[in-house]
Amino acid sequence: MTVVRATPATWHPDDIDHAVRLLAATPTHEGRDPDLLRQWALTATEFGASLPATPCHARIVQLQGGLDEGLLARYTSRPAPTLTLFTDSVQLAERVIAENGWRDWYPPGSVRAAALAHEAVHAQLHHGPHRARLKRALGHVVLRFGRRRVYGHVAGTEEIAAHAYAQVTCGLGRSPLVLTTALSEHLNLPPLTHSDRREN
Amino acid sequence: MGVIILLVMAAGVAAMLTRKIPTAFALVLLAVAIAVLAGAPATGKNSVLDTVVQEGAPMLAATMIAILLGSWLGRLLDETGIAGTLVRKIVEFGGDRPVVVALGVLAVSTLVGTVTGSAPAAMLAGIVGIPAMIAVGIPKTTAAGTILMGIAAGMPFELPIWQFFSTALELPVETVREFMLKLFPFALTAAVAFVLVETRRRGVEHTWSLRTAPPKSSQRKRLGDAPWYALLTPVIPLVLALGFELAIIPSLLAGILYAVLTTTRPGQISKRLLRTFYSGVEVAAPPIALFIAIGMLLAAVKLPGAVDALAPLVKGVSPQNAVLFVIVFTVLVPLCLYRGPLNVFGLGAGIAGVLIAAGIYPAAAVLGLATSYNQVFGVSDPTSTQTVWAAQYAGVTPQQVMVRTLPYVWFVALGGICVTAATSL
């Protein structure tokens, strides 16, 4: 897979809209200022895109049943870091891409690669120093002691960063969030709301 | 006759287990059947209609009022944004360390559990808490279990529960409080152990979900952060009841007043109080229906005819030796699951009544057994509303939650039963 580095100028406005909607549906962001959410979405996207490309060290397991669970991939850190790729969901995604004529955005095989990249970022953020950097980049101050500031965690931004990383690393023309929306519509899944369980 | 009464009780349990009849209705039918089998006349002293129905129905009136006030306070915690603010702050401060978020949500659930119980308590802490935990990587079953274990850790200080055991077992509130203080360390230890062990065993989980955010935000209206001093609301009734030994109902009322005064403009206070009271009544309706039925059942098993019939049978199988007492009643813990015969908010209340009325155990020992079983029922029973709600909201089955939490709450029950054997037998 060719690595194509996107610059902020290349982000499609719709991609950022998708990211903003994801944040808005994340608990703790009830009714937050949409401009602030947009700023966080953009920062997280840029942060994810800037992450160094790293191979996925997790054990990869391929399973059926993703459509039943409503999942494309899953990363679990215990007992050993494992990345589960749901092959039925990946196949459906490839079919939806072909039906919508999105091959320019998502080349053949890119869904699998994006899923691996997406979960690899979660592994990186979980184990590495990047999480603290993301928090600082977002600049959500929750406490001040004179000049000292305590930055707060912004729920949902890691997910946006993971999607941006996958987009850049796999050379996708559009965010994987666009594909997620298409898959959700194809499967007629109810949208996430605050009163729903939240998956990321 | 005692055997027939026990067979009728078994039939009642079967009806509740299979959900043929709602628990409250099944308990009323059981109460009437037991009274008839015990040879009670239709009316007059120790009768079906006057003693069981008329006097039994309001027997737990004080508990019903306490439940109602707890539900009212719960609605206020929700509407004023106090519960949401607590969880939001925890996620913001500890979001990059999932175990810290889980411990924080556990603490909020414990606080909420001191105020109100059942599904409303799970919803207060869980509506924001469960998705927030899942968002930071806590696996779904652990997230649901954290809410339930937290509520159970608060249960020893849930004032309506004190009132229930005090009235149902005819014990002074002070005796109930004293035992609850001994039970609390077990409940808290198990809850913290659950979070620490399960987050370590299961690690974190992140998924690429096929579900997406709605095109237009359909999010709950943000209520704004409640002021920091309003966040103290859940501890107000507790401090008054525990520290100042104020009665339960005034303590709960003080909590309600504190919540509304610290979060509401003066002109809006009466409107908000009335609105949340009405919705609190709705929330309290199912447990109140249950307490009406339990009151009748308690009245029925205390009838002289029922006591005479059941006492020899129950006495024959009830261990008197302290070690046997602990072993037998710890092994019997699963019988409080699935609306089983030891479920305190079902037939278990009747059995407790028989144990006391027949003089098999002192009331304090029955209190120890009942509260220990209540800790198990409150977390692991896949038919209890809070477990069903928390599991489904997290996206897992109640049975998964039961399997994950049962070892921890079994330990709590063991602790409670050991204390009972050591202090009350």
Image (cartoon, helix red, strand yellow):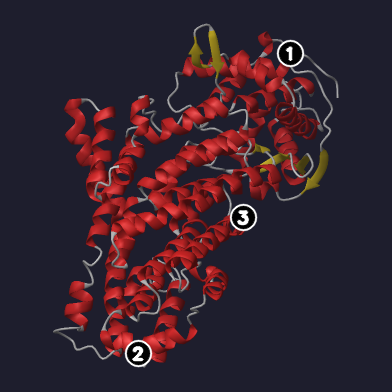
Residue at disc 3, secondary structure: helix
Q: Does residue B87 lie above or below A36 as drawn?
A: below
Q: Quadrant of the N terminus of chain B?
A: bottom left
The numbered dot on residue B309 is 2
Rendered view: A16 above or below B413? above
| Nearer to me, B25 or B327 | B327
Label disc, if present, on residue B404 of the rendered structure: 3
In 3D space, how far apart are the residues under numbered discs 2 and 1 (Cα atoms)?
83 Å
Alpha-carbon neighbours of circle 1 within 10 Å: few (<14), some, or many (≥20)?
some
Q: Tell me where residue B385 sits by quadrant.
A: bottom left
Q: CA distance from mark 3 to mark 2?
A: 40 Å
Looking at the picture, how far across and down is residue B250, in whole percent? 22, 46
Q: Hey, what amino acid is under mark 2? A: Ala
| In this picture, residue A146 sits left or right of residue B356 | right
Instruction: Please determine if labels 2 and 1 lie on a single subunit.
Output: no
- Tell me, yes or no, if residue B225 can be seen here: yes
- Disc 3 sits on a residue from what chain? B
Front tag of 1 and 3:
3
Circle 3 or circle 2, nearest the eye: 2
Q: Are marks 1 and 3 on the same chain?
A: no
Q: Chain of mark 1?
A: A
Give the quadrant of residue B404. bottom right
Q: Chain of mark 2?
A: B
Q: Is residue B216 visible?
A: no
- Kind of residue at badge 1: Ala
Instruction: Name the disc covering residue A6, or none.
Output: 1
**Left or right side of B53 for A39:** right
